[in-house]
Image (cartoon, rainbow, N blue to C red):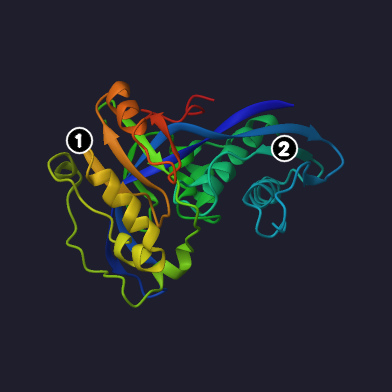
Amino acid sequence: MITYPAPAKLNLFLHVIGRREDGYHLLQTVFRFIDYSDQLSFKVTHAGVIRHTNPVPGLMDTEDLCIRAAKLLRQRSGKESLGVDIQLEKNIPLGGGLGGGSSDAATTLIVLNRLWEINWEKERLMALGLELGADVPVFIYGRSAFAEGVGEKLDAVDLSPAWYVVLTPPVHISTAAVFTSKELTRNTIPIKMAAFYTVQGHNDLEPVAMRMQPVIAEWLEWLRQQHGTTKVAMSGSGSCVFAEFPSESAARQIFKQLPDDMSGFVVQGLAKHPLSDF
């Protein structure tokens, strides 16, 4: 088996600017990959079986995005005789807003596109990924991106080098529950991509998530009290929160002060996905 990374992402801001008639929300956000990854290993087989060799306990195949991604790619490409054994080393917290499941699905599509000799263009893989989830296309796109629509309309952005203290509260947040909450505001005024460089933005999902899990508010407040940070926010629908710093030393200095009842990690922001040239 050969092993490939599936990196986490941060939403540097997330504005909800409307809602489509089909119920999907219209968003504006900036995605940034970070150097913190799940690890996926693949072994191509010819028995027509797609399986996890170490399935996540309690996760059905119908919910497993790696299995769903592999089956969808095989079906659409007509490679029905091929199979694959998938092994997943899970590092990205579940239900944390760091995009772990979407990233796993994207890495599965990227790698099997090559290993199964399908060789589709990136745009075609991104369209397939969108059927699995709104965050999947950006991981295939492979760059820091300003995203609109439901998250699938992507434009590359150049971000300054940065390090992050990412905190991982011991709670899970349901993305669906946040987006369907009556308390969620859906009327943030849209901004132009160029404006991102001059405004901080915010995460419209934060107030709802904080009411669901007050620990998120407590950990965000702790980060906001620290010196030297250039941004503090919740990522996606939570529960993970982060603070941005201009240097590794600044981030690690703050992390040393982390209270004993808090957990997290220090990580570097990436300019591109590690498989962007695969």
Quadrant housing the C terminus: top right
- Provide the secondary structure element on which disc 2 rests: strand
Residue 147 in view here? no
Q: Position of residue 137 (x, y in %)?
A: 46, 46
The residue furthest right is 47
Q: What residue type is labelled 2?
A: Gln
Disc 2 or disc 1, which is closer to the eye?
Answer: 1
Figure disc tally: 2
Write the residue at 50% across / 53% down: 170
Which picture quadrant has residue 35?
Answer: top left
Q: Mark 2 points at which residue?
A: 87
The residue furthest front is 260
The residue furthest left is 198
Write the residue at 47% across / 61% down: 173
Q: Name the residue under label 1.
A: 227
The residue furthest bottom is 182
Is 152 or 119 nearer to us in this picture? 152
Q: What residue type is labelled 1?
A: His
Is 8 or 155 nearer to us in this picture? 8
